[in-house]
Amino acid sequence: MSKIGAIILAAGKGTRMKSTTTNKVMLNLAGRPMLSYTIDNFRKAGIDEIVVVVGFAKKSIINYFGDSIEYADQKKRLGTAHAVQVGLAKLSDDVTDVLSVYGDDSYMYSPELLRKLIDTHKAKNADMTILTVEMYDPTGLGRIIRSDKGTIQAIVEERVATDELKKIKEINTGCYIFNRVFLTKYLPKIQKNPVAKEYYLTDILEIAVTHKKKIADVAGGRIPWRGVNRPEELEQARKLIAQ
């Protein structure tokens, strides 16, 4: 019997938001913290075991949600792969598949979309399932590279993308479902980025491709989606929620 557990990454400082006492996932969207939308939608999708990886301004999260969710403290911010590793240790042993999202861009994932992602992952018996979206302006985001057969082969970050690759509108959301056995085995194989000195979760795709693992995806198309890294993006997020 399969069971989905969720890890929400919310340990980052969000430097560009200039918040000193509140984690950015707790910023207000239409009268509620951003993170509350994600958690509510997870529960509506049937995901009851939720771990939030905390770090910067963790009390702003813990004081609001109390014991309604589980927390994993990322004491050293060593990147997204490390954050998932910290969160994974908090999931119960009977969790067979792990949904991983960022706390600052998952507020618009509807229960229906989450169920589609889960159902696709199960139906295709995938090791890793990726949610993608299409952006009118994908500037700054990782582009999805597909094979001739349509399968995802790579995620190319903008800083290393060619002019031709920058024309791709389909981007990586950072929303994944992993088979837990696959994740437990291959997450520790991610190497530290030599420039950033962090472990990036996106690198697990290359590992999956190299080891010929089953990679599935849900192409979300032009669904409402907006990461929140700057004050102007917070305003855009508020407009999306209002709509």
Image (cartoon, rainbow, N blue to C red):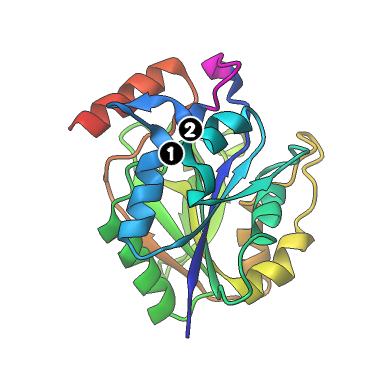
Rate crowding at label 1 as few (under 14), some (14 to 19) or many (20 or more) other CA atoms within 10 Å: many
Q: Distance of mark 1 from mark 2, alpha carbons?
A: 5 Å
Q: Which mark is residue 35?
A: 1
Q: Locate residue 242 relative to residue 20 in the image: left or right.
A: left
Secondary structure beneath disc 1?
Answer: helix
**Residue 74 versus residue 243 in the image, above or below:** below
Question: Quick check: is 120 in the magenta stretch?
Answer: no
Residue on which disc 2 sits: 25
Q: Locate residue 223 relative to residue 50 in the image: left or right.
A: left
* Amino acid type of the residue tagged 1 in the rendering: Leu
* Amino acid type of the residue tagged 2 in the rendering: Val
Query: Quick check: marks 1 and 2 in contact, CB under 8 Å?
Result: yes
Q: Is residue 39 visible?
A: yes
Where is residue 233 shown, x and y percent of the image? 39, 23
Which of the 4 image quarters holds residue 216? bottom left
Secondary structure beneath disc 2?
Answer: helix
Where is residue 235 shown, x and y percent of the image? 33, 19
Q: Which residues are magenta?
A: 16-23
At 43% from the left edge and 25% from the top edge, which residue is drawn?
27
At 51% from the left edge and 51% from the top edge, which residue is drawn?
69
